[in-house]
Amino acid sequence: MDNGTNRDIELAKELKESYLKLKKEIQSVVYGQEETIEHLIIALFSNGHSLFVGVPGLAKTLLISTLAASVDLKFSRVQFTPDLMPSDISGFDILQENKETKVKEFAFVKGPLFTQILLADEINRTPPKTQAALLQAMQEREVTASGRTYKLEPPFLVFATQNPIEHEGTYPLPEAQQDRFMFHLVVEYPSLEDEIKIVQNTTIGELYKPKPVFNAEKLIEFQKLILRVPVSWDVTQYAVSMVHQSRPETTKIPEIKEYLSWGSGPRGGQNLILAAKTKALLDGRFHVTREDINFLAKAVLNHRLILNYRGQADGVTTFDLVEKLIQYMKRED
């Protein structure tokens, strides 16, 4: 930690307490999905965007809107559709009369991108032109409209949802945009016990309304603390080696060489380390371990691996290959 200052130690304790409170607020509305909730909160504290993929009815939208209600941040939701234009999310100019001078002039009306948490619902339903506008906001944290560039208020996070079973009228996300997501999370069906709780608690009246746990200023303070968490050379080498082993041209893993066209770029290693720092603090530790890297590898690397034709024909998934990657790294450890 930054010279082991008392302030950082106290802030780390406050971070863990806030995490537990936030988790409790979300779990009061969303039942089960514990690992998905943990990853969502890690992404929040790490200042990383996340993509949630799952069939309809698994509370993807509810999960993100509940998170937004549990923190005192500006929140916008956009339902992505094929006719959505870039100006619909970034903003547009309107001609209006100046009340003082009576002269007509253009004024910029900010779109829903000017927020702190953006829920991009069914993100793959909008065409590439609109996805490109979102890509700039995700990468640069700024918006260009009518030839002018506007900075987005920090923290700015995109949490997107996607339906994996409906392909008609959809536009696959470009690899460049997928790479901007820290996590690609598959939301699974709930267990029998959790589904019983869902039915019991959602058919008796109004849902619990979460209370804000912290505000934007405190979140930014937590995010800066996470950046100061030290990571040993050994753990950094482990994470970067995992990324290198994901690439067909440098891997020693036969399945990756056989089934992948492309592996992860450097952003995969960056996100592994950053998320692992957050994971360590949430667990009450001031050091990052290889176990943290292994725990986060699937969510970080899955969407950064691109199958070749043989992989697709043989029904291999990128999750299978990330698991091979983790097992290889454990054996080499």
Image (cartoon, rainbow, N blue to C red):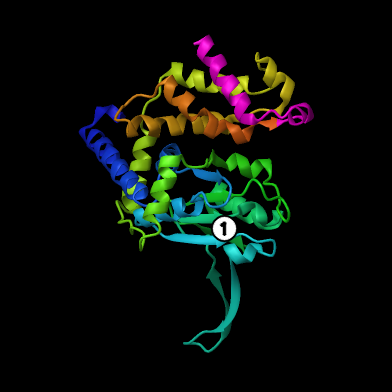
Regarding residue 326, the answer to whether it shows in the image is yes
Q: Quadrant of residue 242?
A: top right
142 above or below 295? below
Q: Residue at x 65, y 42 (%)?
A: 176
Q: Position of residue 102 (x, y in %)?
A: 53, 89
Tell me where the magenta segment starts and ends, as one range: 307-333
What residue appears at the point 50 percent right and 87 percent down from the top-left corner?
101
Comparing 329 with 217, the one in front is: 329
What residue is shown with label 1?
A: 143
Q: Is residue 46 visible?
A: no
| Rendering coords of residue 40 (x, y %) | 44, 43
The secondary structure that dominates the magenta segment is: helix
Q: Quadrant of the N terminus?
A: top left
User: In this figure, what is the number of numbered marks?
Assistant: 1
Q: Is residue 8 left or right of residue 189?
A: left
Q: Is residue 317 magenta?
A: yes
The location of residue 28, given as percent across then percent down, is: 34, 50
Q: Residues within 10 Å of mark 1 (few under 14, many from 20)?
A: many
Amino acid under disc 1 = Val
**Horizontal arrangement in the rendering, residue 184 relative to residue 235 (left or right):** right
